[in-house]
Amino acid sequence: MRSQSLWPVVGCTRCLVLEGSYDLNKKFFLLGEYQDQSYDFGETTMLTVAQRANTAGKADDALAYLQANLEYHPKSVRTYSAIAQMKTAKGDKAGAIAALEKVIELDPNNAQAKAQLEALKK
């Protein structure tokens, strides 16, 4: 069975941002209950939704989207990198460090993450 896009189900990105993370995560949970259909929970889709939520000033929702993305893509370097950036912007130094350490665990040659981690630890 071919995977369907999430967009027709959960709406456009702007709608996702306006609905808030609780509603989005609830929809994702409910979609997981449908045994006869398959939906594309693509890594890039969720990263885009999180970025747009963050741009709209909804950093907590953006972080919730990223956490949801990790449910489907637990080894996503891009998602952990985005979490680190958002936590840094929120002033959550410990959270940013933890996310960057995970990036380096998954991608030991990631020079950018190593530099960011070193800067945060100073």
Image (spheres, rainbow, N blue to C red):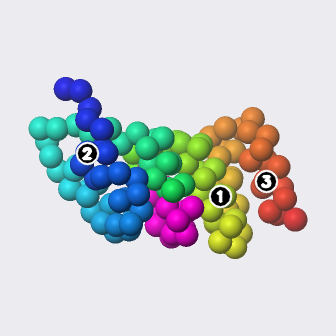
Q: Quadrant of residue 108?
A: top right
Q: Is residue 70 visible?
A: no
Name the residue: 52% across, 65% down: 56
Q: Position of residue 102 (x, y in %)?
A: 63, 50
Kindly identify which residue carries mark 3: 116
Classify 32 as above or below 60. Answer: above
Name the residue: 16% across, 38% down: 37
Q: Amino acid at mark 2?
A: Pro
Q: CA distance from mark 1 to mark 3?
A: 9 Å
Q: Is residue 58 visible?
A: yes
Q: CA distance from mark 2 to mark 3?
A: 37 Å
Q: Earlier in the sequence, mark 1 or mark 3?
A: 1
**Nearer the camera: disc 2 or disc 1:** 2
Classify 76 as above or below 60. Answer: above
**Is 27 within the magenta?**
no
- Label number found at residue 84: 1
Question: Start and end of the magenta stretch?
Answer: 53-70
Secondary element type, mark 2: helix
Secondary element type, mark 1: helix
- 117 left or right of 40? right
Quarter of the image that includes the N terminus: top left
- Label number found at residue 8: 2
Q: CA distance from mark 2 to mark 1?
A: 30 Å
Tags 1 and 3 touching, CB below 8 Å: yes
